[in-house]
Amino acid sequence: MAAVEVRRSKRRRRTVSAYRDGDRIIVLVPATLTRAEEAEWVETMVARVERAEARRNPSDDELLERAVSLSDRYFGGIALPESVRWVDNQSARWGSCTPGDRTIRLSARLQGMPTWVIDYVLVHELAHLIEPHHNDGFWAWVDRYPQAEKAKGYLLGWSAAAELDDPPGESLD
């Protein structure tokens, strides 16, 4: 179970809410709750946050299925990966692709981000199966994804907020 921080509020009357903040789940409760009520609500809200995260974070098999679907939709099925998986060792990149063995790896930092952002990174990596370099042809493939610019902006904003540099050799411009 994740670390949990409970915040009581005198202004909060009836509602209870929760959200993830890094490695913790923050649960906001009215100050009037008893300790037993608080414990019950914490258990309920932590389970709710974890269920929502599980829905947003597909398994490696689901990532592969998603990548195949995106390849079909935007590339006519010509960019077929052998495998797609989450990895924890990418702190400077959102994803990587090895065209030789057709493998794609996505940074675990993407977990919990909107589906359309994860799809953008998948499309980006799938485009490397067609064109390995970040040249005009590559970006023409990536730009087939209708939310490409929006997703680039999202990732740039996230990186700026986290005070991270753009991935090496890959400005999102």
Image: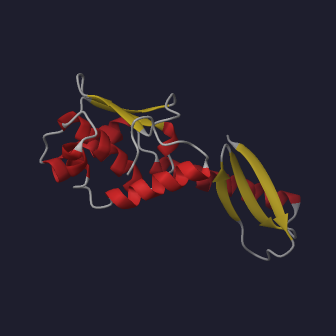
Is 28 on the left-hand or right-hand side of 60?
right
Is 48 on the left-hand or right-hand side of 12?
left
Residue name at image x 25 percent, y 48 percent = 139
Residue name at image x 46 percent, y 51 percent = 56
Q: Position of residue 64 (x, y in %)?
A: 30, 38
Give the position of the N terminus as an image quadrant: top right
Residue 18 visible in image: yes
In the rendered view, would you say 81 is above or below 13?
A: above
Q: Residue furthest top?
A: 101
Q: Position of residue 131 (x, y in %)?
A: 20, 36
Residue name at image x 53 percent, y 34 percent = 91
Q: Position of residue 82 (x, y in %)?
A: 24, 29
- In this rendered view, identify the residue nearer to me: 11 or 46: 11
- In this rendered view, identify the residue nearer to me: 77 or 173: 173
Q: Quadrant of residue 30?
A: bottom right
Q: Quadrant of residue 18?
A: bottom right
Residue name at image x 18 percent, y 37 percent = 130
